[in-house]
Amino acid sequence: MERPPKGPGAGLLPLVWAEESVGSAAAAPQPSFLGQPEPPRSGWERLRAVFRRDEQKQYPEEILNIFKATFSGSIIGLFYGGIPGFLYAKRRYIEQSEGTIYYNHLDAVRSVHQAAMRGFIRYGFRWSWRVAAFVAIFNTVSTVLSVYRDKIVISHFAIAGACTGGLFRMHLGLRGLTGGSIFGALLGIPAGGLLMAMQSLSGETLVERRKREQRERYEQNLAEWDAKLRITENISEEAGKNSPDFIPQTRS
């Protein structure tokens, strides 16, 4: 029960009885920021959740793994193509400059080194973006399939390898598309088996980890929300007791 406010200081804070405040807080609906205790059941909802940032403005672990794998692939491709390009450009420059006259030995060494570095950058960049694109497409397709079906199986990696290999050989026609798809599928099976083995050694898969982290995040948000509700209840009770119009009720 709530009485109309009287006096000059009345009306600044709402006067609510303690038992009414407790009842309204207990029946208050949960806010949307708490999320859900379990991941969405629909595959499209899980995909939208994976490509959406959380409350801390961070991407899920699956997206971060794609970025990390793509960056690692670019570095590996850089050295995989750059080191042979470095040696090839150095040897070719020496063969073509046998009759070249240099001012001194340092000038000759500098010219050879510059030619070798140009070969490293040229061939390294060529392999770097190709390996990075291959890894990015492979991981993206396998991650989308795993998140959509909510499980990780070896067939996802085979399909991802077939899609990636087919895209890279599509410019060669139907024969290149077929051959690239077969080669990509054969390459994706051992790669997927290696990734699944590494996850099994860690104790849980990415799907299990995502469910556990979402459950822990939900429980943490729920505990924080409950603590804020209790603080609000205490403030309402103190405001009601300190009001000059407060009349304590006697329970029958």
Image (cartoon, rainbow, N blue to C red):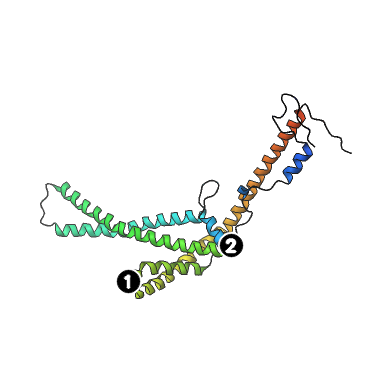
Determine if residue 205 is in view.
Answer: no
The disc, 2 or 1, on the residue closer to the chain's N-terminal end is 2
Q: Is residue 195 left or right of residue 230?
A: left
Judging by the rendered image, the residue that carries numbered circle 1 is: 172
Q: Which mark is residue 42?
A: 2
Determine if residue 185 is in view.
Answer: yes
- Could you tell me the amino acid type at mark 1? Leu
Quadrant (top left/top right/bottom left/bottom right) for the C terminus:
top right
SS under mark 1: helix
Q: Which mark is residue 114?
A: none
Task: Sort mark 2 into few (<14), some (14-19) or many (20+) by Cα contacts within 10 Å.
Answer: few
Q: Is residue 209 left or right of residue 244?
A: left
For this orientation, the residue located farthest to the right is 252
Closer to the eye: label 2 or 1: 2
Asked if residue 109 is positioned above or below residue 186 in the image, the reply reads: above
> Is 197 or 64 nearer to us in this picture?
64
Asked if residue 188 is positioned above or below residue 45 in the image, the reply reads: below
Asked if residue 154 is positioned above or below residue 64 in the image, the reply reads: below
Asked if residue 84 is positioned above or below residue 231 in the image, the reply reads: below
The alpha-carbon separation of the residues under discs 2 and 1 comes to: 38 Å
SS under mark 2: loop
> Is 50 or 22 nearer to us in this picture?
22
Residue 209 position within the rendered picture, expressed as x and y whole percent measured from the top left: 57, 56
Residue 138 position within the rendered picture, expressed as x and y whole percent measured from the top left: 44, 63
- Could you tell me the amino acid type at mark 2? Ser
Task: Sort mark 1 into few (<14), some (14-19) or many (20+) by Cα contacts within 10 Å.
Answer: few
